[in-house]
Structures are given as C-alpha cells and as structure tokens.
Image (spheres, helix red, strand yellow):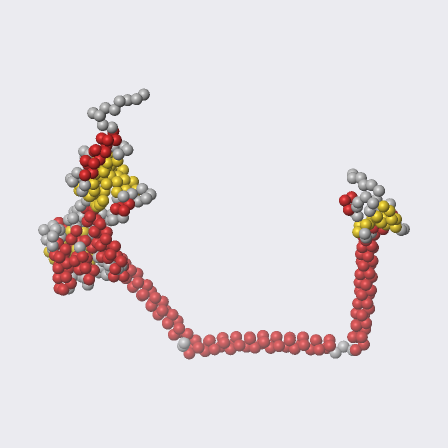
C-alpha cells in the first residue's frame, strides 16, 4: 500500500533531530550547573556512571563517562547531595534527554567531610595518632585547665562535676572562641598560654554539640598542632558522643561529653573514701599479723634460750652419748655377722678334692644323658622332615604322573601346553614312563 508523502507533516526522526540540534546548541544548555540528590545510581563495568538527579518536584536522567569519573574524589551513593556540571544531551532512538555530566562533587557538608578525611589520613601517616605519643592523665590533679567558651555550658558542667567528685582540685579557665572564623587560632593560643604558665596538671579542650561547620575549628591544623605539641596532657570533649574531630584522635584521651571529661580527669571522692576504708582494713590485718608473727618468734626464742642453758646442754649430751653407744653396738653386731658369713664361705671352698671330683663326675654324667636325648630328638625331627619333603617331591614329579598314564609332549625340546602351540604335520616327541615316541600331527581338534 503506497502512502502519499504530505510535506506538511514531519517524521518522528526529523522532529527528534530538530529538537536535538536545538537543545545541544543552546548556549544556556551547553554548560549547566545544577544541584540535587542522587537516585538509582549504577556503576557500569566499563566505569560509566548512570543515575537520576532529583529534588522534591522533578527528576532528570544523568550519564557520566569513564573518562570523567576518574576525577570524582568520593564514592557516590544513593541519597548523596551533589553539585554537577554538564550539558544537555538527547538520545534519538528513544527521544529522551539527559544530562551528560563532566564534573561531580558533594554539596556543602560533603566537601568539608572530604577535607576532613584527607587531613585525617595525612596526619595518621605522619604518626599524630600513635599511642606512643600519648601522655598519661594524672590520677590526682591539683589544678585542671579548661580551654572553652567562657559563656557556654561546658565550663559550668565541668566545674559542677569536679566540685561534686573531687573538691581538692581547682579549675582554671582559658577562654577561647570555639566556633566560627578565628576559632582555631584562639584555641591554639590558649593551649600555648596554658603550657607557658605550666600551672595546671591536665587540660580539657572542648565545646558543646553542633554541626560539622560548628566544630570545624577543631579540625584545623593550628588546633591540631597545639594539641600534639602540648607538654600538658589533654582530654578532648568536643560535641556530642557521636561527634569525632581530628583533635579527638590527636589528644591524649577522648571524652564523649564535657561532663565525662571532668570524670576522666578526677577521681571520685566516694571511690577514694571506699579505698581509704579498704586500706584501713588491710592495715589492721597486717598489724595484727605482724604482732602475731613476733609473738610466735618470741616464744621460739624463749624455747631456744631454755635449750641453751647448762643443764639442758648436759642432758642433750647424755642423750647423744646414749644414741652413739646404741649405734656402736649395732654396727659391731653387723660387722661380726659379716665376718662369720665370710668364714663359712671360706670353709665351703676348702672341702677335700675328692668331693669335688665326685661332684663334677655326677654333673658330667647328667650332661651326657641330656646330650644323648637332645641328639635323638633332633635326628627324629630331621627324619620326619625328610619324609615330608620326599612325599611332596614325589607328588610333584612328572614321573609320578606317567605312572597314571600321562605323557609329556614336546616340540623342539619345548613342552606343549596349548593346542595353538602345534601345527598340522609338525613333528612332536611324546615322553612316556619308559621311553619316547616320535610322530607327526595329522589333525587338531578343539574342546
């Protein structure tokens, strides 16, 4: 069926080409800057990124080729708020448009986080977080320095906690800006001042909770260097329990809150009172044990002194003499018994020679009799063995088989055992019991 071409109507491809040219050559759309939230993010095996950029009211498809993804400084994921630079592109086969992305960055807080991670890795490599560099916190500080805002709740919380736990300690405030421009320099200067005065045993550096921007002064190198180089041990108490700044990793000890920092810096008076009571109990036990030990020792000394008196010494000597006499009689009795035994043995050896001759004659006769019996037994055993071997040899002899009508058939002096070993007209030798038969094979037959 032929359709007439109507010039008033465009084809779909023609319209798509027109829209593509318009979109991709519009100066306002060849370089666009746009922000939004990542959705449906996919990473192609060849390195391309495919995702949707959306806000509360609209969404648009995006593609970023592998040559550009290599410059992305973070790992994109669902829900990231990003800033992109790119241009509008239209895909003709489906007539859909998308943004061809050339640059992809995290929006706002994301950039601060990247900066945070980069500095953290650099300092970790340099050894700023090493345990070997951290100083011990004194157990019984006399003075505690606090670097924080003079108007915030931090100083009040620390003061109240220290007063409640350990009244023997003084609090010295080193007022500093803890938020906004200049905060890092202010914190650094107060840490340096505390080290110069050297009047406190430990420093607490901190502030209350806030956003990453609010806490950023504790992620700057000025604050970090001051904490790292401080001769005074430093406890950091920055933000809430889940907040971590780089200063927390550099400090000698991290506390999740200012109140916790005050608790870590001071002993608890109730614990000390309990410990003192334990010490008192231990001292009483040790004292009692000490006295009992020396009372026992004194009793032993009294007993020893009594044993060293002349009368005791004389009695002991009498006992020793009696013991020695008993031992002398015992040894003399044993010696006499040994001598008598030796004498009897010598008498036995000195018997008349005729008695010895008679004794050895009897022994020789007995041995001759045993030898004759043993020879007869061995001879009988060998005869039996010979008969067994002779019967076995006879049973295996070919001549025995010939007595029963069997013969040995040979060809060329080789014994034939199979039908295939012989052919028609072969000359063969048949060995009988009393001679040989020579013949020619006339025919063969298998079983």
Q: Quadrant of residue 98?
A: top left
Q: Residue at x 69, y 77 (%)?
A: 343
Q: Is residue 94 visible?
A: yes
**Residue 235 image offset from top left, x and y in percent:** 20, 56
Farthest-out residue, left = 151
Farthest-out residue, right = 434
**Relative vertical location of residue 287 with respect to residue 39 in this rendering, above or below:** below
**Relative vertical location of residue 186 with respect to residue 338 in this rendering, above or below:** above
Q: Residue at x 16, y 58 (%)?
A: 222
Give the position of the N terminus as an image quadrant. Answer: top left
Q: Judge left or right: residue 341 versus residue 392.
A: left
**Residue 21 image offset from top left, x and y in percent:** 21, 36
Q: Judge left or right: residue 146 versus residue 422.
A: left
**Residue 217 image offset from top left, x and y in percent:** 15, 53
**Residue 8 image offset from top left, x and y in percent:** 20, 25
Q: Residue at x 80, y 61 (%)?
A: 378
> In this figure, what is the number of numbered marks?
0
Give the position of the C terminus as an image quadrant. Answer: top right
Q: Is residue 274 visible?
A: no
């Amino acid at each position: 069926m032929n359709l007439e071409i109507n010039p008033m109507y465009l084809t779909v491809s023609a319209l798509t080409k027109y829209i593509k040219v318009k979109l991709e050559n519009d100066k306002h759309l060849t370089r666009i800057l746009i922000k939004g939230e990542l959705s449906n993010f996919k990473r192609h095996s060849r390195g391309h990124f495919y995702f949707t950029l959306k806000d509360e009211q609209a969404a648009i498809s995006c593609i970023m080729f592998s040559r550009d993804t290599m410059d992305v400084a973070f790992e994109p994921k669902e829900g990231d708020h990003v800033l992109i630079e790119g241009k509008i592109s239209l895909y003709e086969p489906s007539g859909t448009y998308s943004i061809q992305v050339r640059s992809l960055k995290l929006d706002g807080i994301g950039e601060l986080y990247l900066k945070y991670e980069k500095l953290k890795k650099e300092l970790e490599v340099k050894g700023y977080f090493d345990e070997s560099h951290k100083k011990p916190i004194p157990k019984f500080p006399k003075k505690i320095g606090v670097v924080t805002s003079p108007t915030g709740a931090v100083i009040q919380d620390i003061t109240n906690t220290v007063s409640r736990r350990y009244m023997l300690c003084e609090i010295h405030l080193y007022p500093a800006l803890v938020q906004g421009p200049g905060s890092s320099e202010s914190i650094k200067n107060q840490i340096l001042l505390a080290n110069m005065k050297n009047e406190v045993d430990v420093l607490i550096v901190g502030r209350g909770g806030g956003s990453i921007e609010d806490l950023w002064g504790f992620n700057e190198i000025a604050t970090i260097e001051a904490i790292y180089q401080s001769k005074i041990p430093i406890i950091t108490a920055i933000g809430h329990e889940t907040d971590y700044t780089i200063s927390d990793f550099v400090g000698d000890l991290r506390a999740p809150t200012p109140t916790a920092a005050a608790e870590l810096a001071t002993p608890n008076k109730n614990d000390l009172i309990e410990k003192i009571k334990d010490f008192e109990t231990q001292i009483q036990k040790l004292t009692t044990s000490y006295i009992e030990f020396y009372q026992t020792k004194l009793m032993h000394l009294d007993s020893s002194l009594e044993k060293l008196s002349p009368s005791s010494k004389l009695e002991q000597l009498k006992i020793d003499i009696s013991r020695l006499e008993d031992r002398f009689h015992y040894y003399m009795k044993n010696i006499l018994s040994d001598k008598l035994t030796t004498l009897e043995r010598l008498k036995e050896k000195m018997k008349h020679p005729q008695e010895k001759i008679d004794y050895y004659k009897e022994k020789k006769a007995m041995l001759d009799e045993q030898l004759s019996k043993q020879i007869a037994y061995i001879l009988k055993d060998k005869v039996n063995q010979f008969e067994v071997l002779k019967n076995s040899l006879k049973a295996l002899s070919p001549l025995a088989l010939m007595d029963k009508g069997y013969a040995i058939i040979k060809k060329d002096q080789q014994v034939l055992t199979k039908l295939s070993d012989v052919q028609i007209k072969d000359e063969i030798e048949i060995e009988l019991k009393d001679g040989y038969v020579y013949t020619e094979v006339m025919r063969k037959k298998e079983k």
